[in-house]
Image: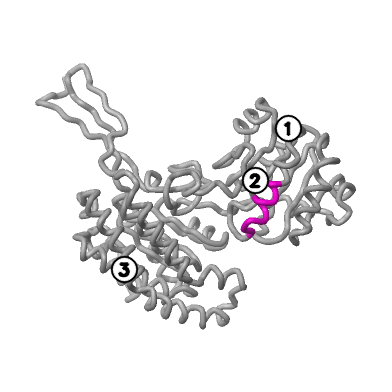
Amino acid sequence: MNDLEKTCVELAQRAQRAAARLAAVTGRQKQQWLRRCAELLGERSDALAKANQLDLDAAPGFGLSDAAVDRLRLTPSRIAEMVRALDEVAALPEPIGEVISSSIRPNGLEVQKVRAPLGVIFFIYESRPNVTVDAAALCVKAGNAVILRGGKEAAHSNAALTKLLAEAAVETGLPADAVQQVGTTDRDAVGYLLRLPEYIDLCIPRGGEGLIRRVTAEARMPVLKHFAGNCHVYLDRSADPDMAETIVVNAKCQRMGVCNAAESLVVHAEAAESLLPRIGRALMDRGVEIRGDARTCVLLPGAKPATERDFAAEYLGPTISCKVVDSLEEAIEHINRYSSKHTEAIVTRDLAAARQFAARVDSSAVMINASTRLNDGGQFGLGAEIGISTDKFHARGPCGIHELTCYKYVAYGDGQVRE
């Protein structure tokens, strides 16, 4: 075992010991920790800004795009948002120990299904330092220890934030190792940690498709993931024109570089002649390039012909694919074929069509007359989220505190034995 591998094993062992202690920590203690973290963020905003500036200064050397640099930046408003997120998580009901169900057997044995922590979570993410705080808050609130591995481009910011979180833990009686950071940018460290299922219970990668595929291939513990966000908006033949335009423009343009932004537009042929020119102009006026099938290109002379690859693409930028279909059935088939199972929306005044769409589209969230951008933990009332899962086991969609727990059975008896 080389020095780096030994360091990773010791890191995971400390996390496991911390998780064992966290399982017995009260909800009040966790609230105190979250609120102390929020206070320290405000008190140390200048120090955090200095650490963040080191990362911003180094950003050109990593070849980061303007959008990536923006995600990296810790502004006063973003620090304020982090404080609000901590307060919101603190205000959430305590999940650990919740009795999910209970029954009394004929022999008098009381059987309870009780919410319990997962244990140790290895969270790998890129660029955005605020994710450090969101992830730690959710993991610890759910009774888990967390090992954080941020991208090298945010190393100074993440180190400053993790130090703050650990200090608050000590002050409020939580184990200092409840929140730890992988202290090296060496990629081999990730591989070593992914091979430690005896200490780490779940891995959550949050970033580009290459990162997620690497983690999925190498991990020996369960992985909670989504590979891509090819989200669709389907305009049914009965779609209200004003609503259709508002939803499509918001879904695509409100923030283009995120996983719940719309990347694909599907339009019923009976509505396409009236809706597509209007919505196409609205998108093009906002700098969006449309890549469509033959019928789209006839109705939108400014559109470019789409390839098979376009219909499956997650652009994360000012491009959208478009397909005209002859029926709801064809729309559902097209979406299920090309979707990444993240978020799909239908705009319709036909309740039967909405129900068919919701029942048959296979994605983590289906929006009826609402933007795909609303598939989010905060928007769904879950508080902060650690990511949006396109898996089906063990969690799907926005992952908040409940998705970072499991359950155990606790049986209360007074001497019962099996006959």
Secondary structure at numbered mark 2: loop
Q: Which mark is residue 339?
A: 2
Secondary structure at numbered mark 3: helix
Give x and y (percent) for residue 386: 44, 54
From the image, state whether disc 3 or disc 1 is nearer to you.
3
In the displayed structure, does residue 159 sit left or right of residue 260? left
From this view, report whether residue 43 is shown above or below residue 341.
Answer: below
Q: Residue furthest left?
A: 415
**Residue type, mark 2 in image:** Ser
Residue 14 covered by magenta stretch = no
**Residue type, mark 1 in image:** Leu
Query: In the picture, which quadrant includes the C terminus?
Result: top left
Secondary structure, magenta segment, majority class: helix
Instruction: Name the residue carrying label 1.
Output: 328
- Which residue is depicted at the point 81% across and 47% down? 278
Which of disc 1 and disc 3 is earlier in sequence?
3
Residue 9: in sight, yes or no? no
